[in-house]
Image (cartoon, grey):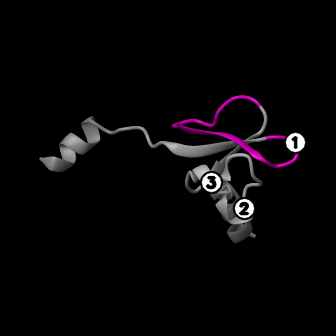
Amino acid sequence: MASLWTLLLQRPRYHAYARLDANGKCLAFKHCSQAPSGSGWVRVAEVQLAWLGRELPASARVCARASRRWHQRILAA
């Protein structure tokens, strides 16, 4: 019964995003279920207030996962 409730009441997954200026300094953070519109937003693993006004560490960024179709093309050959 618990699995039925989890299917019916699924919550959207929120991700953390950081807005960077032209020099790579962090200007703001945002939590949302979809990528924010506009330029300068990058997905980060976590929010650290110490990054505000400073350059974002390279380890903070989340890399986009490869699509499944890409893997299927490689295996099909």
Q: Quadrant of residue 34?
A: top right
Mark 3 and mark 1: Cα distance apart in space: 19 Å
User: Under tag 1, what secondary structure?
Assistant: loop
Q: Is residue 33 above or below residue 42?
A: above
Q: Quadrant of the C terminus?
A: bottom right
Mark drawn on residue 57: 2
Between 16 and 67, the residue placed more toward the observer is 16
Q: Which residue is mark 1?
A: 22
Q: Which residue is at 62% across, 54% downward? A: 50
Q: Earlier in the sequence, mark 2 or mark 3?
A: 3
User: What residue range appears in magenta?
Assistant: 21-38
Front label number (2 vs 3): 3
Position of 77 with respect to 48 (left or right) is right
Residue 59 % position (x, y):
68, 65
Q: Is residue 70 above or below residue 39?
A: below
Q: Earlier in the sequence, mark 1 or mark 2?
A: 1
Q: Which residue is mark 3?
A: 50
Position of 58 with respect to 12 (left or right) is right
User: Under tag 3, what secondary structure?
Assistant: helix
User: Disc 1 marks which amino acid?
Assistant: Ala
Between 56 and 5, the residue placed more toward the observer is 56
Q: How many marks?
A: 3
Circle 1 packing at 10 Å, graded few (<14), some (14-19), many (20+), is few
User: Disc 3 marks which amino acid?
Assistant: Ala
Q: Quick check: is 60 in the magenta stretch? A: no
Mark 2 and mark 3: Cα distance apart in space: 11 Å
